[in-house]
Image: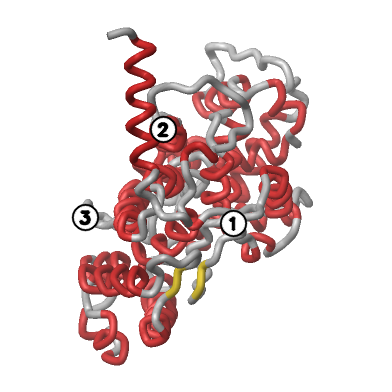
Amino acid sequence: MKEKDIFEDVKSIMLQQETLLSENACKAHKCIRLHDEKEDIRPAFFRDIDRIIHSQGYTRYIDKTQVYSFTDNDHITHRVLHVQLVSKIARTIGRALRLNEDLIEAIALGHDIGHTPFGHTGEKFLNEICKKEHIGYFCHNAQSVRILKDIERVNISIQTFDGILAHNGELLLNKYEPNNNKTKEDLLEELNNVFNVEGYSKFIKAMTLEACVVRLSDVIAYIGRDIEDAITIGVIDRQDIPSQITKVLGNNNSNIVNTLILDVIKNSVDKNYLQFSKDIFKALIDLRNWNYQKIYDSEEACKNKKELEKAFSEMYSIYLNKLEGKDYKNKIEISDNLPYSEKNLYEYINLRSAEYKNNTNVKRMIIDYIAGQTDKFFLRECASNLDEHLV
């Protein structure tokens, strides 16, 4: 059988599979990319999955904080596990609603690539530096798109980029409804606005129902899992969770996840939006608020916060000073006797495209560099450059 015939047969099978999807699903043939390319045997959004998991940003998930940064326990959640949990939950919901699981998985696996070392704490510090330096703002969802689109230059679909940008899991809604009229140009404008308009990220509406599923699944994935981690390291006890919440959602991650998934499926079948029932949504809001009070603002979660804030500020200044006077738009010469930390910075800059260097302020380059670091790499950089060590 000729290769062309095999390709056509596989393509025919995939088209048949798409006929089983809901009319509200985003079909593969609707895929839009920033750059045109030839078709291959993989469906369009499946190709996005492959490219995301082969990206350097994806490999760095392995050592990025979810909630607890300085806890000596191998069983608590890190960012790499979180995105897998989001993917699994989102695909479960998507399958029940007959949506495009490939698009869902691509968005889920890529949605947190822009997270900084030390999670939302690091994100806050970089945002403060951006404001102080008058270079806009920092949001991890927009940074995820920036890493894939501008830094690694991965040709991901507009629909996947959109789902990543719109995933804001910290903002809970009772109804998630897509903007089906959004265009590629609209997405690029939104991406620019997130970096330049304070708080703009909160107002973004996804273009696909699949993206709405991931956004909602982000909440489902962390809300109960963070409770289990907090119990594991002794921050809370299970009986501390208010009874008015547990009687509706359950008192462990398994029950909470199951309750939320079944409820959103029940209330969203054959609809072009996602919705929780009234009682479930109220309990979810109450649990999210309780988690912030007892878990995210706990002493354990905020350990070394002041020291970290100082370290982020000082490392930013150190990197900026190292690039002062350097012709970073061309290749920076790296001698053998340079300190390891300085070599890392120059190698990072040298690997960037001419387009990136010509269109990126040097201060934003440093923000990009820090944002891409893992927890351990950042700590090594601190140990090499600062008098005080964090650990």
The picture places residue 83, in percent across and down from the top left corner, at 37, 50
Q: Position of residue 319 (x, y in %)?
A: 63, 36
Q: Is residue 140 visible?
A: no
Q: Secondary structure at mark 3?
A: loop
The residue mark sitting in front, 1 or 3, is: 3
Residue 191 % position (x, y): 67, 48
Residue at the spot 49% in from the left edge and 60% down from the top edge:
212
Q: Earlier in the sequence, mark 1 or mark 3?
A: 3
In the image, taking residue 244 as reference, residue 179 lies left or right, namely right
Mark 1–mark 2 Cα distance, whole angstroms, equals: 39 Å
Q: Which residue is mark 1?
A: 125
Identify the residue at horizontal 77%, vertical 25% (top origin). Answer: 325
Which residue corresponds to the image point at 36% horizontal and 66% vertical from the top-left?
A: 220
Q: Which residue is mark 2?
A: 43
- Amino acid of disc 2: Pro
Disc on the earlier residue, 2 or 3: 2
Q: Secondary structure at mark 2?
A: loop
Mark on residue 17? none
Q: Nearer the viewer, residue 321 or 66?
A: 66
Tell whether label 3 touches label 2 (CB within 8 Å). no
CA gap between label 1 and label 3 equals: 27 Å
Q: Nearer the viewer, residue 234 or 53?
A: 53
Circle 1 packing at 10 Å, graded few (<14), some (14-19), many (20+), is some
The kind of residue on which mark 1 rests is: Phe
**Mark-to-mark CA distance, 2 and 3:** 36 Å
Residue pushed farthest top?
2
Q: Which residue is identified by label 3?
A: 75
The answer to whether residue 257 shows anywhere in this view is: yes
Nearest the eye: 71 or 214: 214
**Amino acid of disc 3:** His
Tell me which residue sits at (32%, 32%) in the image.
13
